[in-house]
Image (cartoon, rainbow, N blue to C red):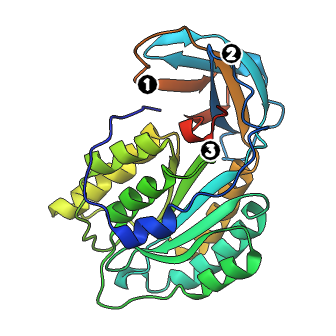
């Protein structure tokens, strides 16, 4: 996972004002790392993508800018999550949206408990379908607003950029963006470098579930999206899961819900320095174990 210097860009006031509303959070759960310690929120899964129980200090390796750090404590993550769900509801989503509705219903049933979830549609421009909430009825209403917009293209990178901007104003210690992407046209104005930098500034993990082949790279917009899907998920501590049929969307979302609801809090030693590290990596010492993680968000740390 890399922390990037942000690239400033234009701001859409209406979108930001809705997505960036800060939720009230308590501070008692967040202050478990000392002044010379740092915290990561880590997913631990097996080769099938299923959560691994009983992660220990001996299983985890952390490096910053190539230097090994001492892992001090590992425990279950109980801090609340902010989850922004971005859905491609453009013309290319024909046949996919019904399966997305089913998958999100199952995902939200697990993840809305104690967390805050927002939903954004991407056809033509990013549009908020439901602001951050844990209320099942509001999430259900948001899912009901998902339908295919004919003669439209997606705006994935614009949506990622603006939602990341909004998350910077929220105070949760950990946050993820879940993007559901179909293999159609993308009309985003943002470049992948700008968008990845903004995700890094927000300290948010990007998880993508993409549907289709994604073999067409004959224009700049599609190449730009391909770089975003490949690099943005990796450097933020997330993942990309590509499925070929709409029926695979719900199992992928259910697996992701199991992963996110089973994360660990990893506290490691960090020497005092005037220059913060540019890159923090987590890896597994145990064979067959896959770890990916994101640093605790600065806005979520106790003062």
Q: Secondary structure at mark 1?
A: loop
Q: Residue at 55% across / 36% down in the picture? A: 298
Most distant residue in the right direction = 54
Q: Position of residue 62 (x, y in %)?
A: 58, 19
Residue highlighted by disc 2? 71
Distance (Cα) linking label 3 and label 1: 18 Å
Q: Secondary structure at mark 3?
A: strand
**Looking at the rendering, in which quadrant would you find the C terminus?**
top right
Q: Position of residue 253 (x, y in %)?
A: 64, 63
Distance (Cα) linking label 3 and label 2: 19 Å
Distance (Cα) linking label 2 and label 1: 16 Å
Q: Which mark is residue 117?
A: none
Q: Can residue 182 be seen? A: no
In primary-sequence order, the first of circles 3 and 1 is 3
User: Which numbered mark, 3 or 1, is in the foreground of this view?
Assistant: 3
The vertical placement of 188 against 54, above or below, is below
Q: Residue at 49% across / 70% down in the picture? A: 18
Residue highlighted by disc 1? 279
- The local crowd at label 1, few if under 14, some if 14 to 19, many if 20 or more residues have their Cα within 10 Å, is some
The one nearer the camera, 12 or 97, is: 12
Q: Residue at 64% across / 72% down in the picture? A: 104
In primary-sequence order, the first of circles 2 and 1 is 2
Residue highlighted by disc 3? 174
Most distant residue in the front direction = 303
In primary-sequence order, the first of circles 3 and 2 is 2
């Amino acid at each position: 996972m890399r922390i990037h210097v942000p690239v400033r860009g234009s701001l859409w006031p209406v979108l930001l004002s809705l997505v960036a509303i800060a939720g009230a959070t308590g501070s008692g759960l967040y202050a478990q790392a000392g002044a010379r310690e740092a915290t990561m929120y880590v997913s631990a899964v097996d080769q099938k993508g299923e959560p691994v129980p009983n992660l220990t200090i001996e299983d985890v390796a952390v490096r910053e800018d190539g230097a090994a750090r001492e892992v001090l404590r590992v425990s279950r993550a109980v801090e609340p999550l902010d989850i922004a769900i971005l859905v491609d509801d453009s013309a290319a989503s024909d046949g996919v949206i019904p399966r997305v509705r089913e998958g999100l219903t199952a995902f939200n049933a697990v993840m809305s408990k104690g967390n805050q979830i927002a939903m954004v549609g991407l056809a033509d421009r990013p549009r908020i379908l439901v602001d951050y909430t844990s209320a099942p009825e509001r999430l259900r209403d948001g899912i009901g607003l998902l339908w295919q917009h004919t003669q439209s293209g997606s705006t994935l990178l614009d949506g990622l950029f603006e939602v990341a901007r909004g998350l910077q104003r929220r105070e949760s210690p950990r946050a993820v963006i879940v993007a559901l992407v179909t293999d159609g046209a993308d009309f985003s104005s943002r470049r992948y470098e700008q968008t990845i930098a903004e995700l890094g500034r927000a300290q948010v993990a990007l998880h993508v579930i993409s549907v289709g082949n994604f073999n067409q790279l004959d224009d700049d917009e599609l190449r730009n999206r391909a770089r975003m899907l490949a690099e943005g998920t990796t450097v933020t501590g997330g993942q990309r899961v590509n499925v070929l049929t709409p029926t695979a969307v719900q199992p992928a979302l259910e697996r992701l819900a199991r992963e996110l609801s089973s994360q660990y809090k990893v506290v490691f030693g960090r020497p005092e320095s005037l220059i913060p590290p540019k890159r923090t990596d987590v890896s597994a010492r145990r064979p067959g174990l896959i770890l990916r993680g994101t640093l605790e968000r600065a806005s979520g740390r106790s003062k």
